[in-house]
Image (cartoon, rainbow, N blue to C red):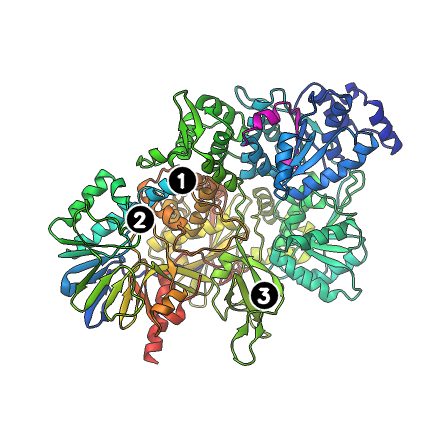
Amino acid sequence: MALPLKLEKTHKTPGATLVGETLVLDLSGGLWLPEHRTLVVSDLHLEKGSAFAARSGQFLPPYDTRETLACLHEAVARLDPARVVCLGDSFHDAQGPSRLDVADRALIAALQEGRDWVWISGNHDRAVQDGIGGRFADTLALGALILRHEPASRPEPGEVAGHFHPVGKVAMRGRAVRRRCFVLDATRLVMPAFGSLTGGLNVRDKTFDDLFPGGFTAHLIGDGRVFAIARTMLTRD
Amino acid sequence: MPDASASPTLPAAFAAWFAARGWAPRPHQLALLAAARDGRSALLVAPTGAGKTLAGFLPTLVELAEGSGSGKGGLHTLYISPLKALAVDIARNLEAPVAGIGLDQTIRIETRTGDTPSHKRSRQVARPPHILLTTPEQLALLIAHREAAELFRGLKRVVLDELHALVTSKRGDLLSLALARLHRLAPGLAMTGLSATVREPDALRRYLVPQHPKPAMADLITVQGGARADLHMLETGRTLPLAGHTAWQSMPAVYELIRTHKLVLVFVNTRLQAEYTFQELWNLNDDGLPIALHHGSLDATQRRKVEAAMAAGVLRAVVCTATLDLGIDWGDVDLVINIGAPKGASRIMQRIGRANHRMDEPSKAYLVPANRFEMLECRAALDAVEEAAQDTPDPRTGALDVLAQHVLGMACAGPFSEDELYDEVRAASPYADLSRDDFLLVLDYVATGGYALRAYERFAKILRGPDGLWRVRDARTAQQYRMNVGTIIEASKVKVRLARRNRTKPGSVLPAGGRVLGEIEEDFAETLTVGDTFLFAGEILRFEGLHEDEALVTRGPPGTDPAIPSYAGSKFPLSTFLAARVRALIADPFEWDRLPAQVADYLVQQRRRSVLPGPRDLLVETFPRANRHYLACFPFEGRLAHQTLGMLLTRRLERAGMRPLGFAANDYGLAVFGTRDLSERIGREPGFLDGLFAQDMLGDDLEEWLDESAMMKRTFRQCAVIAGLIERRHPGQRKTGRQVTISTDLIYDVLRKHQPGHLLLRAARQDAATGLLDVARLGVMLARIQGRIIHKALDRVSPLAVNVMLEIGRERVYGEGADEILAEAEAALLDEALA
């Protein structure tokens, strides 16, 4: 049985660009845009646990919101962004905000303090329009980038989107590793889900062939850093 | 114990039936009848062939014949078997005596299994038969039925078959809770337990009767073990290897035995060994003998065919796994052959008992070791059988996840009071010591998930009404319970299909057309990547990809080694009892005369080159080999405990700056390897070795490792399914998009961080102690060896160490070291960029 390599922990991968904009794919699963001092996080799915309890009687640990916000807090404290963009599906359902715990609500308010906070609406939380601080938008343009929840069917250069919760899987020598990932080509980026209890869709699914007809590179979030993996190295579930 | 001579005489019709066959009722059959007349529960411990089943049913048949049964003809007796097939078989076997005694017009006997159609099930509740034969899972469903109180009110007796096999698992916990409920629904209910010989019959006697308000035991009726088994180790005169599990050297001798007997059961320990053995025997089968294969990965209809052929007497041999350990008598087996290590004395006796089901004639059996270590193990097992020494496991402490499932079921049956249910649960022997605090935690878990953060109060699954009684929330919750019942979590499997090469497109394959070779675990299939080679069905196969839930393969080119090792040894760990005997054999040169010469020579070599440890000692050897430094030790505590020990030792060596690179483990020992000189360090630093094996490794080091251990996550997943936190995936159910499913690994991580004391984490830890990690056994071993570590610094590998060294590179790793894999995949991208 081989032992894990000891790899230095590092939050940033240098070097990715999209339509001339610098992208930093953060180990937290967020996207850091240094030129705009903006942190983008996608698919937080806050209050997913309570949504399951209400709808199906499955009692997942109710700590998902706290956990997600703690990760967000860590990234915000480290990067000190002027702007935070939540790229849609920030809440698992439209009633999510009303089920927020007092402490979690206060945590969101504290994160919003002193910075521009944008809630992009997604398919799960389109009906959420106020009562949770920040401003609401369907899309947001930042320099050459266009930020929206669901990738447009016709490619638009510079698009940053979420929605699909991409994960990549690497299998070799009898071992398999399945991790959240950023999916990138020269024109668009699909972000991983940031939420703590969110599942994932394998990037070898046909969905991603349609989105990236010319192929892509998946940046898998490891334990210590983000790894750029070629599509050919990734396997199906 | 009731005196058989004082037993009541049999009713005339019964006596006539016995007499007509030239039989006389056996003393234990009459003893059980006497216990039943007094309304007492009893445990019958008897070897196979003693007529246990008839003994179990005799009291019921007598009562029903005398009309002293359940008044208006309701359910009189329940029969519970661990196997669906066994229940069906027993029902068939009862037909003859029932008809012979002339009861076939008055007594209705039916079975109820997962295969029973729903209209028949409803009818069985509305108009129950006199005798119902079923399984623990079906009983759980029945007692959760709204009509349960009515159905079981007149129940007189429960017959529990193969009780020794039922009680050692979570199924036994679930069954014990169901029996506790039956005792309450039907006061005066008597239990009849039927068991093979066990080490501690008292544990089973307690299992049968309520332990609350005060502990009690059922009567014990023992039948002494018939004729002594005619048991030998198969010696072929050929030299066996130091490791490996295929026993290919012995196959011609095994074939010869099959040729000279009527029907031979060839037992092996794993599916892989079964496949291999079957293949080898076919290659030798010049006489065209009908030899069949029977194991759990085969299609059910295929297995039924083999069983029917055995019963019809058209087969000469069946190669089988534990699937044929229990129960059914298929045909007239005159020889049992066990290939590979016996692993446990009781297990091997059970298997031997499959031959010749007449207890006054000896069962004939051969043990076939596959390597020299297994020869030692076979010798130890022969001695144990000679002394009739048993090593059945200790009684269990009831699992909390199983209790959670049961509590929800009881709410489905009807409103319950907290106090009454607590008392009822403690009547079940695995839960006799359950604290009230823990019971309330389980109740809280069932109601709202048991979270410190009270987020789900308004969605509670069970609610306490103003009358103080707990009720299930709604019909949907009850439906969810019924879908989730049971404790067996089947690993999902995928078919392995031989693909045809695509001629028009070299290097690709056509998905359809080839035949199905069998099934492999989905977990294993998911780690394969195109081009990997692995061993299956006795062949080296090349993985070509997954296609619609099938693994497509082609035959590997001749001479290739399988790149992906799949564990081919025993999945049952060596029992503590046999391990102690093997250690004693090694330690005592006067015993070596009784070993095959090649094993004695091997031990002599070990003594000359290193040392032979005493029966309570731990031998640790350190030596260099090919630029690496090794530490090998031989605790003989089973592979699971050794793997856990290996993980913990490498952590400690890492902290001590010894740069370990990895380790390998098998049932007998383990070897850790690294780049720093271990002999030098141990020689220079007194106490280093003692510190390395100090008992406190089961504290923080273990905790830290458990946190990230993939085996722990797997254990947690099982608990989460049993306790109903996540829904069970049913066989045949297609995978839906992973986007909507929630990974239990994520749940585990979140829970561990925010509520480390949560009920399900406790349940998983309790399982880890005895299950995949075998921590409990490791703890006993570490205590035993304190101050008894014998170190030998050698300049090369010792004979003993060769066995475990051969394991290096064979094992798979689950989940550990994710970044290493990712870094390697990334490097491939870089290579591509630079090419």
| Amino acid type indicated by mark 2 | His
Determine which of the numbered discs, if any, sits on residue B497 in the image. Answer: 3
Q: Is residue B832 above or below residue B739?
A: below
x and y percent of residue B236 in the render?
Answer: 72, 59
Q: What's the CA distance linking mark 2 and mark 3?
A: 41 Å
Of the 4 image quadrants, the one containing the N terminus of chain B is top right
Per the image, label 1 sits on a secondary structure element best described as loop
Q: Is residue B483 above or below residue B302?
A: above
Q: Which chain letter matches label 2?
A: A
Q: Residues within 10 Å of mark 1 (few under 14, many from 20)?
A: many
Confirm whether the magenta stretch covers residue B146.
yes
Tell me the magenta residue range: B145-165
Residue A191 falls in which quadrant of the image?
A: bottom left
Write the residue at 49% across / 63% down: B809
Q: What's the CA distance linking mark 3 and mark 1?
A: 40 Å
Confirm whether the magenta stretch covers residue B512.
no
Determine which of the numbered discs, if any, sits on residue A57 in the image. Answer: 1
Observer-nearest residue: B834 or A6? B834
Q: Which residue is identified by label 2?
A: A92
Asked whether the beta carbons under mark 2 and mark 1 sit within 8 Å of each other, the answer is no
Residues indicated by labels 2 and 3 sit on the same polypeptide chain: no
Per the image, label 2 sits on a secondary structure element best described as loop
Which marked residue is nearer to the observer: mark 2 or mark 3? 2
Residue A107 appears anywhere in the view: yes
Asked whether the beta carbons under mark 3 and mark 1 sit within 8 Å of each other, the answer is no
